Image (spheres, grey):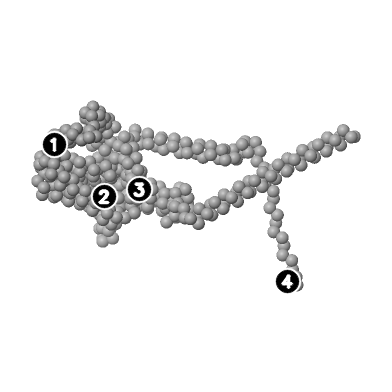
């Protein structure tokens, strides 16, 4: 009868054979640590190789990266035009022409407003720095002239070094490289705007199943992160330039237009750019108008930066750029050393895109396992799992020792029996 039917016992788990030889030598905690260190070293070597190759081929890699960043920002505009009946080529050419007009206008402002008055800006900055240096000698914690001179020399050597000045600042060959890179960027940007989704689908052909889903999800997040960063940063830079430019013009600071252009450009370099532009504006005001007006300029810069950081960036950029300040500074330094000013500008959006990819690695809202924020219950589960693993390891070790003792006992009995015979 079913009521009296006995339940079959679950199958016995076969005993785990103890590890021997090389596997046993690498199975302890030190062996696992050594294996993980080897994996990290291999990854670092691969990353270093990629960085070196990118630096050698910077004439190609930098224009392609710039085209990718700009295309990510302008892709919604192209999609909107296509949805409203524009042919694909016409929509792409319209957006590309708009991008070129904006870049050309920015270049014109740089040449007319900044380059033509660069000597005046440089002279005012140097004079303002000298006034600050003279004022610092009256303080009880005054810095010696030799220390200031060493700091200025170090900064000057870095700014005029090959790393920082790489690009369009190194002569005729660099000018040719710049023009080549500009043409390449325009061509690549056209195809990214026109056929970006199809190019990405072509690159995803080797992937299937879960790998395809992950690659597609990561690619979408990278594009949205880059696009959101560029659109948000450009808007913030325009607001900063208008706010600070109008403010210093009201105060009466000369060279307000070139200073506003510098504010717009440096706004694309987080943390460092706004500080540098504010210091330059304050030094010009100090030389031209005096310390009171310079303090007014400092106040204007601080107010605009606070409005930007507390209101504009959270609204315009949202979660696009959620990077720690230390990570941003390290990325800026590495980008500047590797690719000069261009590297400083593109390093942060690339870091943000990489972090965005990590955050959706295992799911739409599920980061990769090593980077997930652990909840208290997760930590407790992890501790319990560690305790269970230690108990299993201890039991396995005890079984191994008992097996070895039993084997020795059998061998000893066999030896005695052989002697008795």
Tell which residue pokes out farthest to the top in this image: 146
Image height of 323 relative to 157, above or below = below
Which numbered disc, 3 or 1, marks the residue closer to the eye?
1
Mark 3 Cα shell of 10 Å, populated few (<14), some (14-19), many (≥20): few
- Mark 4 sits on what residue? 2
What's the mark number on residue 418?
none
Which numbered disc, 4 or 3, marks the residue closer to the eye?
3
What's the mark number on residue 233?
2
Considering only order in the chain, which callout, 1 or 4, is on the residue closer to the N terminus? Answer: 4
* Residue 185 placement (x, y as % from top left): 27, 42
In space, the residues marked 2 and 4 are separated at their CA atoms by 73 Å
Q: Do the residues labelled 3 and 2 touch (CB within 8 Å)?
A: no
Residue at point 38% right, 50% down?
A: 356
| Local secondary structure at mark 1 | helix
In space, the residues marked 1 and 2 are separated at their CA atoms by 29 Å
What's the mark number on residue 323?
3
Mark 2 Cα shell of 10 Å, populated few (<14), some (14-19), many (≥20): many
Considering only order in the chain, which callout, 3 or 4, is on the residue closer to the N terminus? Answer: 4
In space, the residues marked 4 and 1 are separated at their CA atoms by 99 Å
Mark 4 Cα shell of 10 Å, populated few (<14), some (14-19), many (≥20): few
| Local secondary structure at mark 3 | loop
Residue at point 27% right, 33% down?
A: 164
- Mark 1 sits on what residue? 124
Query: Could you tell me which quadrant the C terminus lies in?
Result: top right
Query: Residue 119 falls in which quadrant of the image?
Result: top left
Which numbered disc, 1 or 2, marks the residue closer to the eye?
1
Viewer-proximal residue, 114 or 263?
263
């Amino acid at each position: 009868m079913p009521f009296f039917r006995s339940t079959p016992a679950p199958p016995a788990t076969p005993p785990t054979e103890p590890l021997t030889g090389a596997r046993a030598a690498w199975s302890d905690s030190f062996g696992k640590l050594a294996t993980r260190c080897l994996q990290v070293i291999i990854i670092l070597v691969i990353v270093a190789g990629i960085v070196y190759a990118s630096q050698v081929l910077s004439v190609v890699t930098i224009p392609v990266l710039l085209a990718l960043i700009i295309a990510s920002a302008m892709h919604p505009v192209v999609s909107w035009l296509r949805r409203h009946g524009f042919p694909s080529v016409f929509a792409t050419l319209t957006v590309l022409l708009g991008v070129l007009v904006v870049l050309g206008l920015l270049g014109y402002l740089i040449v007319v407003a900044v380059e033509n008055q660069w000597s005046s800006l440089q002279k005012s900055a140097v004079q303002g720095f000298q006034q600050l240096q003279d004022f610092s000698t009256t303080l009880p914690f005054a810095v010696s002239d030799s220390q200031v001179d060493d700091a200025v020399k170090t900064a000057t050597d870095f700014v005029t070094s090959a790393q920082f000045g790489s690009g369009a600042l190194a002569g005729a060959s660099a000018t040719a490289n710049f023009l080549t890179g500009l043409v390449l960027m325009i061509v690549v940007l056209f195809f990214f705007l026109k056929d970006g989704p199809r190019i990405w689908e072509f690159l995803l052909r080797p992937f299937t199943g879960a790998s395809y889903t992950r690659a597609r999800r990561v690619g979408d997040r990278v594009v949205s992160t880059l696009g959101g960063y560029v659109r948000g940063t450009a808007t913030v830079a325009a607001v900063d330039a208008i706010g600070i430019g109008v403010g210093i013009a009201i105060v009466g600071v000369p060279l307000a237009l070139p200073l506003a252009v510098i504010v717009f450009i440096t706004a694309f370099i987080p943390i460092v750019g706004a500080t540098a532009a504010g210091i330059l504006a304050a030094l010009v005001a100090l030389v031209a108008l005096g310390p009171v007006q310079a303090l007014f300029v400092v106040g204007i810069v601080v107010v605009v930066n606070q409005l930007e950081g507390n209101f504009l960036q959270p609204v315009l950029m949202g979660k696009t750029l959620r990077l720690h300040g230390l990570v941003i500074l390290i990325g800026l330094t590495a980008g500047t050393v590797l690719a000069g000013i261009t590297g400083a500008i593109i390093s942060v959006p690339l870091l943000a895109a990489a972090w965005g990819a990590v955050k959706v690695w295992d799911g739409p809202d599920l980061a990769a396992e090593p980077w997930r924020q652990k909840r208290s219950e997760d930590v407790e589960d992890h501790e319990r799992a560690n305790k269970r693993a230690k108990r299993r390891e201890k039991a396995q070790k005890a079984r191994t020792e008992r097996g070895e003792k039993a084997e020795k006992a059998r061998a000893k009995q066999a030896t005695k029996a052989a002697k008795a015979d």
